[in-house]
Amino acid sequence: MSLFKISVSLVLIALSTRCAANEESGGGFGYSCQNTSLVGNVLYSSCQGPDGYTYNPTSIVLDQCLANTNGNLYCSANGNYSSTCSGCTISSATGVLTCTCNDYNNVGQTTTINLNSCVSNTNGNLTC
């Protein structure tokens, strides 16, 4: 096998491993979803289905994906962030969520998190 074929093979393996890891670990919904909005603690979007052409209207309760720890948002399964955060907004262009979340002293802190690190598009559905 030529050096070129080996190099191309290694690049393809690296790229496929990266994609598989992203699907398994979650995140990156913004790359295949559009018309994203937030109502209360529910994220709405239209996400590309497995065929690559069809967009599926989908939603997810972000309490399933986020936690507030001392006024900071983190990706966390069933974190129930909305019980201690308020005034949340999302940038549909970047996927960045901004909230005011209470710290340990019950003082509101402005915090942000890029939901692309917590929320995935799985076959046209938003998942954590």
Image: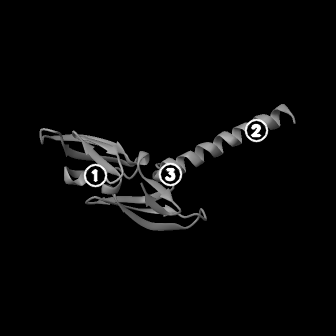
What's the amino acid at mark 2? Val
Q: Position of residue 58 (x, y in %)?
A: 42, 66
Q: Nearer the viewer, residue 31 or 75?
A: 75
> Going 20% across and 45% down the picture, which residue do you hit?
100
Whether 73 is drawn above or below 87: the answer is above
Tell me the residue at 42%/54% (across/down).
128
Give the alpha-carbon distance from disc 3 to disc 2, as whole Å: 25 Å
Q: Nearer the viewer, mark 2 or mark 1?
A: 2
Q: Residues within 10 Å of mark 3 (few under 14, many from 20)?
A: some
Measuring from the top left, give residue 92's x and y in whole percent: 38, 53
Q: Amino acid at mark 3?
A: Tyr
Q: Quadrant of residue 44?
A: bottom left
Between the residue at mark 1 and the residue at mark 3, the CA separation in whole angstroms equals 19 Å
Give x and y (percent) for residue 114. 38, 44
Q: What residue did someone put label 2 on?
A: 8
Residue 79, horizontal then vertical, whole percent: 30, 51
Mark 1 closeness class: few <14, some 14–19, many ≥20 residues within 10 Å: some
Report the residue that reaches farthest toward the front. Answer: 78
Task: Identify the residue at horizontal 27%, vertical 54% (top origin).
Answer: 80
Element carrying mark 3 = helix
Q: Which residue is mark 1?
A: 89
- What residue is at 47 percent from the left and 50 percent from the top? 26
Q: Nearer the viewer, mark 3 or mark 2?
A: 2
Label 2 with label 1: CB-CB less than 8 Å: no
Q: Which residue is mark 3?
A: 31
- Give me the disc on residue 18: none
Q: Is residue 112 above or below residue 125?
A: above
Residue closest to the far right: 1
Q: How many marks?
A: 3
